[in-house]
Amino acid sequence: MKKNHLLAKGIATFLVWMASAPFAQAQMTFSLNGRTYADVADRDNKGFTTVTLPAGTELSGLITGVQVDGEPMNPADVVPNPTETTVSYNELKVFTYGNKAYGFRFVEDVWFCAVFISDCHTNQGSGHDGTSTEELTAIINNIAAMGRDGERKVTFTTPGATHIVPKADLIFCLGDIDQDKGDNGSSGKHENFLNATAEVAKQAGIPFIFIAGNHDLSPDYWGGSNPDKGVTLSGSNADAETLSAITRNNDYWNSQGVFDENIEYITDTSKSSYFQSKPFTFKFKDVRFYCAHTYWFHKLYSKPGLFSSATYYAPDGVIAALNAFVEEHADEASVWMQHYPWLAGSDCNRWWLDQNDTGLYIPTKDASVYGCSTSGLPFNDASTANSLKKNPLADIMAKAGGKSADGKVQHFSGHYHRFADMTYKNTVGSGSTVHDYTVAANGNPSQSENAFIVLFKRGEGVKEVIQAQF
């Protein structure tokens, strides 16, 4: 009993000494077997250092040398000797040298986080829940700074991830990026949005990916019996500017080597001379991301002339290419996104049917399995939208890995300007279901948060989604 009492007293004394020990002045660093210390170590404002190692790293023999303030030390002078000490994942390990304590935690790079925003409508003014350039810049800076001070923005409840201090590894924006078709009406310039988002993310070194919404790429009609239906010459030029902004941004991040596999576009190669929205996919930390724009069924078109209208074509070739790609990569965990929600919003289905607010739409020149040439579509008809577009897409998505424990495909959308958390189930009973998280507009005053913080597990996909304010 006395021995146990003395042991407890000794432990308590050691913990008190640790609490008062000077962690924040001198810095201890290590030489690592097969790793560059500066690439994996992150020292927080409390003086502790987190060493994040790729999943599966063997910890035995990891530490091969030790330095204090850049000067090599004899490892035997450090207690315990780091080169002879076995460290364990998530264990706080304290080394002492010269009456100073240095705290380290080794963690496995199994988890990562992404932040989703949408519908920035940069500088668009009242009626669109828009944000100013300054407001959007502040939002992206706040996202980039998340967790860098060691403070938790949110606390995850997923087993094995409760210790994580979330930091943004990726940032996504899900469309309607600025004013209609660009900064200046139909000019198609997107400099305000890009300067407030993509350029800020570049400075922070955080990959930023954005897709286009219906305010960025031409819908069939805007409203009523608008005679300026579909794509005009100026609208076509603006569409090209939007797509160019997206591909330039994608090219930059490809050039940085941040992805497991670079961004690849999914297109109808038989219609390469026509305008296509070019949905894309890439792989990051062993998770496959599928990114559509307005949605996967955005129509292709030939560019109009001064005296001719655009000719629309069905997206069947794009859907076929998507299906083929998914079948080739069916073993990969995946997450999906597009601008239009699956269920959120009273007019959800009319967008899937390319209708305006009175039911007008533009049929395609070629026949379509997916209903793009069908005449007489009922306005905002859920049954038609389900059978022609949602069910086939849900079936394709269900072929990919990364579904939640209950078999749901994980999906993110915008457009609705409000948060929603809804599940779409294939209406013919195939069992394919889509869990759609709809993120609110940045500037919607009715929403207390403006983003999703999403926890991913390497090789498995989405594990937890939390609303947050930036």
Image (cartoon, rainbow, N blue to C red):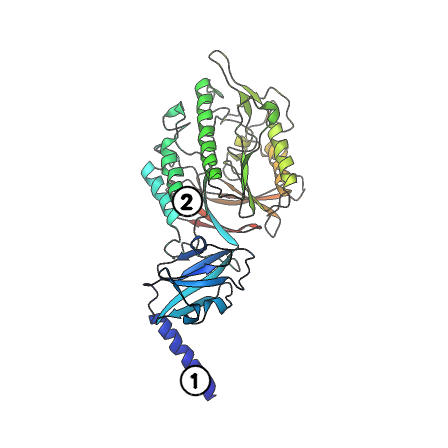
Q: Which residue is mark 2?
A: 205
Mark found first going from the N terminus, 2 or 1: 1
Asked if residue 249 shows in the view, the reply is yes
- In depth, the one of 1 and 312 nearer the eye is 1
Q: Amino acid at mark 2?
A: Gly
Asked if residue 470 shows in the view, the reply is no
Q: Position of residue 91 (x, y in %)?
A: 48, 66
Please tell me how crowded label 1 is: few (under 14), some (14-19), or many (20+) other residues with Cα within 10 Å.
few
Viewer-nearest of discs 2 and 1: 2
Q: Amino acid at mark 1?
A: Leu
Q: Which mark is residue 6?
A: 1
In this view, 376 is above or below 84: above
| Secondary structure of the residue carrying numbered label 1 | helix
- Kindly check if marks 2 and 1 are in contact, taking CB atoms under 8 A apart as contact: no
Q: Position of residue 200 (x, y in %)?
A: 37, 41
Q: Position of residue 400 (x, y in %)?
A: 62, 43
Q: Residue at 53% across / 48% down in the picture?
A: 285
- In depth, the one of 206 and 192 nearer the eye is 206
- In depth, the one of 206 and 41 nearer the eye is 41
Q: Which mark is residue 149?
A: none
C-alpha separation, residue under disc 2 versus residue under disc 1: 51 Å
| Secondary structure of the residue carrying numbered label 2 | loop
* Numbered marks: total: 2
Q: Residue at 41% across / 81% down in the picture?
A: 9
